Amino acid sequence: STQSTGDSMVKRTVTSLVLLILYFSFGSLADLTTDALQSLYDSTNGLNWTIADNWGTGHPCFNQWSGVFCNNGSYVTSMDLVNNNLDGTIPSDFFLLTNISILSMSENHLFGTIPPSLNN
């Protein structure tokens, strides 16, 4: 029937649009996360970190960057880089990672301003 064919086309179109939106949304989030963490690595002399396993390879969650912990493999929720020889400033784009609830970076050589938003 014509109505059944039309309904089927609408469902396929809507499904395709939803998949495209999810793809581009996740792609943007993945890029933001990777870029922000790569900025942290670059601005804190990452080449001289004590442990930097997998940093700079693919996505931090999927490639298990050392000290980075994720929920369901897609969002960075905590980081433990204590006593890891970080030396420099924390870049401003790092603070765009709003899903981080635990951030441990003591016993390093970090300086600069920490935004008040981290107290929330």
Image (spheres, grey):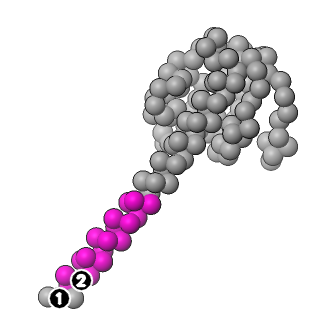
Residue 2 - label: 1
In the image, what residue occupies the spot 61% across and 14% down? 47
Quarter residue 103 falls in: top right
Vertical side of 107 occupied by 21: above or below: below
The answer, for residue 25, to whether it is visible in the render is yes
State left or right for residue 75 relative to residue 19: right
State left or right for residue 18 relative to residue 37: left
Whether the magenta-drawn stretch holds residue 14 is answered as yes
Judge by depth and name the residue closer to the eye, 88 or 106.
88
Question: Is there a contact, CB below 8 Å, between mark 1 and mark 2?
Answer: yes
Q: Amino acid at mark 2?
A: Gly
Residue 53 picture location, percent across and down: 52, 18
Under tag 2, what secondary structure?
Answer: helix
Under tag 1, what secondary structure?
Answer: helix
Residue 55 picture location, percent across and down: 54, 23
The answer, for residue 106, to whether it is visible in the render is no
Judge by depth and name the residue closer to the eye, 19 or 92.
92
Q: CA distance from mark 1 to mark 2?
A: 6 Å
Q: Residues within 10 Å of mark 2 (few under 14, many from 20)?
A: few
In magenta, the rendered stretch is 4-21
Whether the magenta-drawn stretch holds residue 93 is answered as no
In the image, what residue occupies the spot 76% across and 21% down? 88
Residue 46 picture location, percent across and down: 63, 18
Please identify the quadrant where the N terminus is shown.
bottom left
Residue 6 - label: 2
In the image, what residue occupies the spot 48% across and 34% down? 59
Quarter residue 97 falls in: top right
Residue 12 picture location, percent across and down: 28, 70
Q: Residues within 10 Å of mark 1 (few under 14, many from 20)?
A: few
